[in-house]
Amino acid sequence: MTHNLRLAVFGDPISHSLSPRIHGLFGRQLDIDVDYQAIRCEVNDLPAKLAELAAGGGIGANLTLPLKQAGLRQCRQLDRAARLARAVNTLKLDEQGWLGFNTDGLGLVLDLERLAMTLTDARILILGAGGATAGILGPLLAKKPACITILNRTAERAARLAERFAHLGNISGHGLDAQAQAHDLLLQASSLGHSGAMPELAADWLKPDARVYDLNYGQAHEPVARWAQKNGWRADGGMGMLVGQAALAFEIWTGQRPPISATLDRLRSELS
């Protein structure tokens, strides 16, 4: 067994995080002794927390809200996904400092492909124009969809985000009151599910055989699941994305990618 792989996830709040459990499962599956801690951290405390982790032998970290943008300033080098998203969720320490990565978008793509959702030439609709959407657009556009449409309560914000990524493909941003056009896949990337709500969306934004995927999971996914069921669409929650992005981070740290489907099944079994 490989010993003493010290890792952490920083965020605020952080006590709800499933990351320690997920990375513990990864370690057992790959015979790696993982010490992965969830550590509460405010934005101004991030440099000191990372320094403390490094001083204690830590080699990697994950960042969650509200630290993904603040993490950019701690990195001497960023991967393309982090530069596009303007956010990092994974850090790796080398002899010269921290390297920054963003595995959110590719983690989503891995889960969509696991669920047999076709992305190439698909018409994709995304609800929400915040950081979650910015984090997934690069890998989604790399799959060459026919188009991506971003809908947001504030049309200007959606349009600005679309403009940022327009050099990568056919993408546009609009308000929720825009004229509906049928899409193949809905990605729900707003945070409204955490307050028990679903963004107002006309049913004719989606084709009759469309798929619905919510980046949220657990209770935050329930409003979308109810809405999709009412309209006859299959809806999946984002726990697979959570495991997928974590597996990619684990690969960055160790060179080994854990089995995503087996980990997801085990995690769901533990949580049921």
Image (cartoon, rainbow, N blue to C red):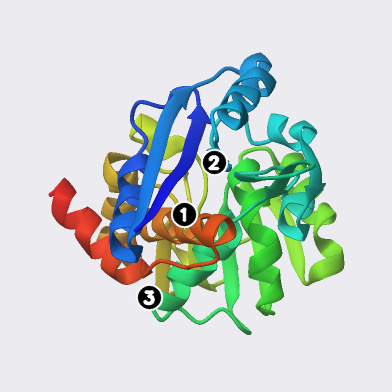
Q: Position of residue 164 (x, y in %)?
A: 83, 53
Please name whichever residue, 256 or 145, is drawn nearer the observer in this view of the structure.
256
Disc 3 secondary structure class:
loop
Is 78 placed left or right of 197 in the picture?
right
From the viewer's perspective, is residue 124 above or below residue 65? below
Disc 1 secondary structure class:
helix
Q: Label 1 belongs to which residue?
A: 246
CA gap, disc 2 and disc 3: 25 Å
Amino acid type shown at disc 2:
Asn
CA gap, disc 3 and disc 1: 18 Å
Name which of mark 1 and mark 2 comes first in the sequence.
2
Q: Mark 1 touching mark 2, by CB under 8 A?
A: yes
- Residue at coordinates 55% horizontally, 66% vertically from top-left? 255
| Residue 135 visible, this orientation | yes
Please name whichever residue, 118 or 203, is drawn nearer the observer in this view of the structure.
118
From the viewer's perspective, is residue 23 above or below residue 73? below
Amino acid type shown at disc 1:
Ala
Q: Position of residue 184 (x, y in %)?
A: 51, 75
Q: Label 3 belongs to which residue?
A: 115
Name which of mark 2 and mark 3 comes first in the sequence.
2
Amino acid type shown at disc 3:
Leu
Q: Position of residue 181 (x, y in %)?
A: 60, 69
Name which of mark 3 and mark 1 comes first in the sequence.
3
Mark 3 or 1: the one toward you: 1
- Residue at coordinates 35% horizontally, 41% vertically from top-left? 20
- Residue at coordinates 35% horizontally, 64% vertically from top-left? 30
Mark 1 crowd level (few <14, some 14–19, many ≥20, 10 Å Cα): many
Q: Label 2 belongs to which residue?
A: 62
Please name whichever residue, 193 or 55, is drawn nearer the observer in this view of the structure.
55
Mark 3 crowd level (few <14, some 14–19, many ≥20, 10 Å Cα): few
